[in-house]
Image (tube, grey):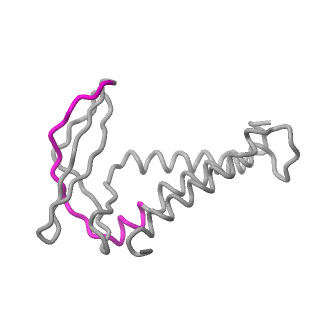
Amino acid sequence: MTARFGLKFVECLFYLLAALAALPLFWPDLNYPLSLTDFGAITFIMIGTGILLPRGIAYRRWRRVIANVGPYRETWDGESSTTYFYEVDNQKYGRSFRTTYDSVRLTHIEICLNPSDPRIVYPVFWNLWIAGAGILALGLFLFLSPQDYFG
């Protein structure tokens, strides 16, 4: 079970810890051992780590394959939705993702396959890596900054 869902569990665990660290931000009048900026920093650090760590492990250790993308379908909000298909050991799998307005329409994407269960994948979208690094950097900045931004 942990071999199948291990990285997804770790990712969700970091998001849960981020949600717990954000709870004091909703009740700022109570006394806490840390400042509200520190709780905000911990929240951003947990979210950034939850994005980067599982994807980094999957990218380095899991098998990567190329998946075929398409067709694109317009959604009610002006964006697009599409499906990507890949084949492993003569089994075909399909997943979907959404694209933003006016983004490049891909025909192939690289995905990292879980060796224990090929249904569990991490698509290699570099914008997620950049977002995760930015969120982590913001958290580190808030944590190391002497100024109190949230209180």
Q: Position of residue 60 (x, y in %)?
A: 36, 69
Direction from residue 39 to residue 78 in the image, left or right: left
Residue name at image x 67 percent, y 52 percent: 20
Q: Residue 120 vs residue 51: left or right?
A: left
Q: Residue furthest front?
A: 1
- Seen in the picture, residue 138 relative to 120 is either above or below; the reply is above
Q: Position of residue 47 (x, y in %)?
A: 56, 51
Q: Looking at the figure, which quarter contains the C terminus?
A: top right
- Dividing the picture into quadrants, the one containing residue 14 is bottom right
Please say whether residue 67 is one of the residues in the magenta stretch.
yes
Q: Residue at x 26, y 37 (%)?
A: 81
Say which of 23 and 99 sits in front: 23
Residue 80 included in the magenta stretch of the image: no
Q: Where is residue 92? Give x, y as percent.
A: 15, 61
Q: Say if 149 sits above or below 45 in the image.
A: above
* Residue plotted at (44% across, 66% down): 7
From the viewer's perspective, tell me whether residue 33 is left or right of residue 97. Answer: right
- Drawn side of residue 92 relative to residue 136, left or right: left
Question: Which residue is at the front of the view, 145 or 99?
Answer: 99
Residue 110, how many percent across, how many down?
Answer: 24, 56
- Residue found at the very far right of the displayed protein: 31
Q: Which residues are magenta?
A: 55-76
Decide: is 142 above or below 9. Answer: above
